[in-house]
Image (cartoon, helix red, strand yellow):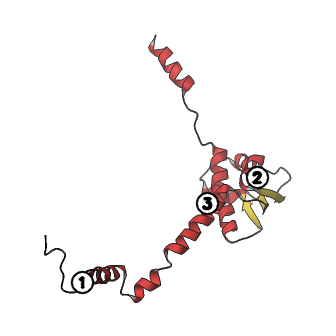
Amino acid sequence: MHAYARIACVRKNAVPEASTGSDAVRRHAFERYISAARRRREKTVAINVGEVHRALALNNRVPLVCAALGSKKFLTEYGLRIVSKTGPPSGQSTTVTFTYEIVGKKQDDVQLARLEAWNRLRGSMKDIFAELGGGENYLRNERAKFYAPGKDPLKDL
């Protein structure tokens, strides 16, 4: 087999790139706007095309951003419904603003809620340990009281 044929086979079987420009726009919009609005328990969220375009440091990709933010994939993936779209009649401008209604929860939001609950639980003993002089002091005192008075468990070794 010629070297060129081997390269062609590798390219043919190569895994396609996982992220496109549209995917990056949708991911940024979710992380920056949608998830934050859900944490604040808001019913609607507005996203300006120009802000997303600047945040992602895109160059002349306004139509891509407009298409990604208005796509059915974006709406269904994150449980959204377009309430309004303001801007020029062409719909292709940095002044276009999409306003969405948050209608459904995505699996990521369920995981986010669980993570927030875990973080609240994690800090629940902080005040109690502070009253006892800190976690290390608490453990030191508990270890000291574990054995009978006057008995040193390491002495018998």
Give the image quarter of residue 112. bottom right
Comparing 56 with 81, the one in front is: 81
> Relative to 116, does residue 92 appear above or below in the rendering?
above
Q: Position of residue 74 (x, y in %)?
A: 73, 50
Q: Foreground mark, 1 or 2?
A: 1
**Mark 1 or mark 2, which has the lower sequence index?**
2
> Relative to 37, does residue 106 appear above or below in the rendering?
above
Q: Position of residue 110 (x, y in %)?
A: 65, 61
Q: Secondary structure at mark 3?
A: helix
Q: Secondary structure at mark 2?
A: helix
What is the distance, in whole Å, between disc 3 and disc 2 at their CAs?
A: 19 Å
**Mark 3 or mark 1, which has the lower sequence index?**
3
Comparing 94 with 101, the one in front is: 101
Circle 1 is placed at which residue position? 148
Comparing 146 with 101, the one in front is: 146
Visible in this render: residue 29? no
What is the distance, in whole Å, between disc 1 and disc 2 at their CAs?
A: 66 Å
Label 1 amino acid?
Ala
Name which residue lies at 77% across and 68% down. 43
Q: Secondary structure at mark 1?
A: loop
Name which residue lies at 74% across and 70% down. 42
Circle 2 is placed at which residue position? 75
> Relative to 99, does residue 133 appear above or below in the rendering?
below
What is the distance, in whole Å, between disc 3 and disc 1 at their CAs?
A: 47 Å
Q: Position of residue 128 (x, y in %)?
A: 45, 85
Give the image quarter of residue 52. bottom right
**Mark 3 or mark 2, which has the lower sequence index?**
2
Q: Residue furthest bottom?
A: 131
